[in-house]
Amino acid sequence: MKSILIGGMGNVLLGDDAVGPYVIQLLESQYTFGDDVELADLGTPALDLTHRIAGRRAVILVDCIASEDHPPGTVLIYDKSDLLTAIPTQRLDPHSPALSECLLTAEMLGASPEQVLLVGAVGESFEPGQSLSLAVRESLGKITSAIVGELKRLGIPAERRHLPAEPVFWWTDDAPAAVSADHR
Amino acid sequence: MAKRITIDPITRIEGHLRIDVEVENNAVSNAWASCTMWRGIEKILRGRDPRDAWLFTQRFCGVCTTVHAMASVRSVEDALKLEIPLNAQYIRNLILIAHALHDHIVHFYQLSALDWVDVLQIPKADPGAASKLAETLSPWTGNSRNELKAAQDRVNAVANSGQLGIFANGYWGHPAMRLSPEVNLLAFSHYIQALEYQRKALQVVGILGSKTPHIQNLTVGGVANAIDLDSQAALGMEKLEMIRTLLAEVAQFVQQVYFVDVCAVAAMYPEWFKIGSGVKNYLAVPDLPLDSRGSAYDLPGGYIRNADLAGVKGFQTAADPIFRQSVTEDVVHAYYQGEKPLHPWVGETEPAFTGWESEQKYSWVKAPRFNGEPMQVGPLAQVLIGYSQGHALTRKYTDLAIEKVAAIGGVRATPAALHSTLGRHAARAIRACMLAELAQKHWQLLVDNIAKGDYTVHNKPVLPSHEVQGVGTHEAPRGTLSHWIVIKDEKIKNYQAVVPSTWNASPRDHAGAHGPYEASLLNTPLARPEEPLEVLRTVHSFDPCMACACHAFDPSGRKITTAKIL
């Protein structure tokens, strides 16, 4: 397992909730990282997130944030101690164990990453089938800078590509059939 | 005067389950199951290429990605009457089995065991005595005194930290908790071990699907795995051996730990064989196809009405004509427009939000009906339908469970006692044992077929210009899943997913009939109504998962107030 994980969380079908996977595609197309870095579109994970984060040195997650205190597009950053203060609620279904519970489980197992950072953008719209709102789109630069800055702080190389690749946002209407073409 | 209790743990941006019960004389007198968010994701699929649909449907839910991918390709294949090569059937079956084993283990340990196991009793346990007790129950080698002491130390560390961490918010010390400290410790030790075996099951999905949580190897007409026995990159002997080892390890955990723990809980809480029955109509579809046409299956399907096990009717195929004709969705109590129940091929998903009104509309979940009746789906439905048709593998593990419960607790359950909260847990463990055995069978079928020189994995789909309809089914961990597609001019004209939790969490219908969750809660005794542990026990026994039953945001315009992170 690679010691650093950069994971995008969220549902690509639900408007601004796609920002996590979106940022992963951006990073993959614009940067090269050290061999010890894994980039992953995690979708909307439940307890399986524990397996993704446990035993790593550092984990950087990108997600959409629901907030009434900040305007859409605001970039918010949470560290491990912030995330550990959330109290788990009753688990009514498998989606209930979210990030904090996975982190608490990793803590209990003694396998919690030393460094955890959540970089998020406050979402505006979660309409099915819509792509990112303008507010969240405008926050993308800040989010990628925050991630690259954190990697620098950790001493992990992240170099901008001289010739950026084309990012694949297959779920948006701009490129409806981009991915499965090779499956036909 | 009845007292109303609402259980509404808002934790995710996706749809979630809300339960309302009325309590009179310390028992549930009325119940409502509802989903708090809108389900409309299928509309995204209209106008798209049907061969791409599975990529989108596997994003319906972050937990059950593969099941929606599978049902989707099957719906297109049904519409095109496309046969699937044997290798592709076996590879798909292995993915489905591994996913289900993962899901059942997670469900019992991480999502429901702590309804029965009191973590805060564990510090009082004697690990040596617990280890001796375990020896009488199972040959599992992970029950040593040291192993149990380590698990106890983990609980002590969390308890002594002054904060309950992962154990905050449990009903610890509740009068309905009855296990000895030693049994609590054993179960909790398995809770920790279960995390490891879930991971192994997921690894199988990852090797065959090339990625988790979103598999990449499906395609309409088969799979995209390249088979080359000598290659490390393709599906070769190296990967196949890895899969065999992982499946064998998971099978051992399921049969020696999970199955035994469920039997032990059942033996120690026998009154729960009489609580939580609810709707006694059951529905399951055949799955794990054994040939390319889908005419023989390893898991039987069919339906039962009014608990009449002898009157069971079987389905011949996974898209049986009776199933195709008999499903409708009713929206009288759901936040959608429309009057009459509609068949999914002509189904509509136009929102009509009103707010929660107990006698009017109160849920974003539609009410699916089979010949107009609510049906319970899930492992219990599958086990009862298989058992009453004399299916050998179902009988083997059901009879074993009955024997095991009797040996531990002296209570001899009958298949009829399975109409209950404990019955749903027992059936899931029975199904997991069946799947663990079938995993090894389908691995061998795949390897034997490849050894014959058959490397085919895909039949090319041809989209007709005229309109066609199809239904793709899968007997998923939570029960019967069906995706209904209408294709016209090579594009998707309509798409509806009728998911297991929609059947089970359905609201009342036009006739006022309760959905399965609702019906199962009626008359449940509550020791402390302000701590409705008993309600959770029954709701959890269904393995609810609402994310695919409904999605997205509250159209009243209110912002989602609870983040998944804070």
Image (cartoon, coloured by chain):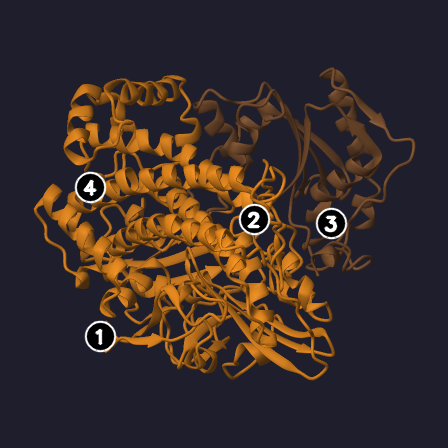
Chain colours: A brown, B orange
Read off the chain for label 2: B
Residue farthest to the front? B452
The x and y percentages for residue B323 are 43, 77
Mark 3 and mark 4 residues within 8 Å of each other at the beta carbon: no
Q: Nearer the viewer, residue B237 or B368?
A: B237
Residue mark closest to the camera, 1 vs 3: 1
Q: Is residue B457 left or right of residue B475?
A: right
Sooner in the amino-acid sequence: mark 1 or mark 4 = 4
Q: CA distance from mark 3 to mark 4?
A: 49 Å
> Which residue is tagged 1?
B308
Q: Is residue A91 above or below residue A13?
A: above
Q: CA distance from mark 3 to mark 2?
A: 21 Å
Q: Residue at x 26, y 34 (%)?
A: B173
Q: CA distance from mark 1 to mark 4?
A: 28 Å
Q: Is residue A45 above or below residue B486?
A: above
Q: Classify mark 4: residues with Cα within 10 Å, few (<14), some (14-19) or many (20+).
A: many
SS assignment at label 2 = loop
> Which residue is tagged 3?
A124
Q: CA distance from mark 1 to mark 3?
A: 52 Å
Q: Is residue B43 above or below residue B408?
A: below
Q: Nearer the viewer, residue A111 or B80?
A: B80
Sooner in the amino-acid sequence: mark 2 or mark 1 = 2
Read off the chain for label 4: B
- Going by the numbered disc 2, the residue's amino acid type is Gly
Q: Nearer the viewer, residue B366 or A161?
A: A161
Q: Is residue A169 left or right of residue B390?
A: right
Marks 2 and 4 on same chain:
yes
Q: Residue at x 59, y 49 (%)?
A: B227
> Which residue is tagged 2?
B62
Examine the image and state in which quarter residue A182 appears: bottom right
Q: Which mark is residue B264?
A: 4
- Going by the numbered disc 1, the residue's amino acid type is Asp
